[in-house]
Amino acid sequence: NTIAVSVREGTTCSRVVDDLAGAKLRKVSMLRLLITLTIFLGSAVLRSFSWAESPNPSQSSINVRDYGAKGDGVTDDSRALQAALDAAARGGTVYFPPARRSYYITTCLHPKSNTVLLGDGAMSELTIPSAGWLLSPGTCYGIINLYKVQNVRITGLHIVGTKQAKDSNNTPRLIYLQSTDNVQIDNDLLENT
């Protein structure tokens, strides 16, 4: 089930809660909820909130923690996350459980074809250095770099980019797609795009 609420800037959180209570959201209080915040810029700033059931990893999922990812926001988890993605080279689900703080990476992640990147919502956060990194089109142009892959799904992740780095050649895209087929990106929180 999904409940969507659009809120004009300046609306208080208590007003949103009252509106949701009026929508009988309390009946689904046993559901695990995923919060997605998207900020739209235009003549007025709107905030759009979406609540939906959290994804559920299976027993056969590849857990990034099993490959050494710390998720403490300090340790460079790049190699551990890429090792988990490489383990799914023939297809599979790579699970990013809620991080203690965030999965901090200093280079692009390269999922393979037939892979699902599965997070648990806002707490499955990927962050990068504020200075970004040197971009290389095709090979390293996004935080998640999809190049010549097919059948990839990215769901339930919170991907935080950098605001414009001092050098625009060092500001990676959140998700970069080139020469891809059948890519699904859903239920993700994308920040600093």
Image (tube, rainbow, N blue to C red):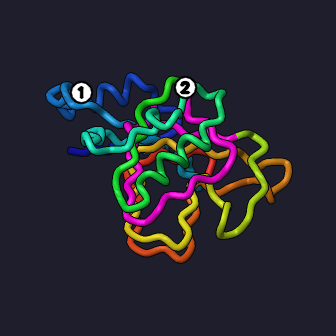
Q: Look at the numbered disc 2 and give the secondary structure of its residue.
A: loop
Q: Is residue 9 above or below residue 166?
A: above
Say whether residue 159 is visible: yes
Q: Is residue 6 magenta?
A: no
Residue at left offset 47%, top offset 46%: 84
Magenta stretch: dominant SS?
Answer: loop
Residue in front for this viewpoint, 42 or 4 = 4
Q: Report which residue position mark 1 lands on.
A: 21
Structural distance between the alpha carbons of marks 2 and 1: 30 Å
- Amino acid type of the residue that numbered disc 1 sits on in the rendered structure: Ala
- Which label lies toward us, 2 or 1? 2
Hey, what amino acid is under mark 2? Arg
Residue 6 makes an appearance in the image: no
Residue 74 vs 80, above or below: the answer is above
The residue furthest right is 166
Left or right of 130 in this view: 48: left
Judged left or right of residue 24, residue 4 is: right
Which residue position is annotated with label 2? 101
In the displayed structure image, the side of residue 127 where residue 124 appears, left or right: left
Q: Are marks 2 and 1 in contact (CB under 8 Å)?
A: no
What are the residue bounds of the magenta stretch? 102-128
The disc placed on residue 42 is none
The extreme left residue here reads 27
Check the picture and name the quadrant holding the N terminus: top left
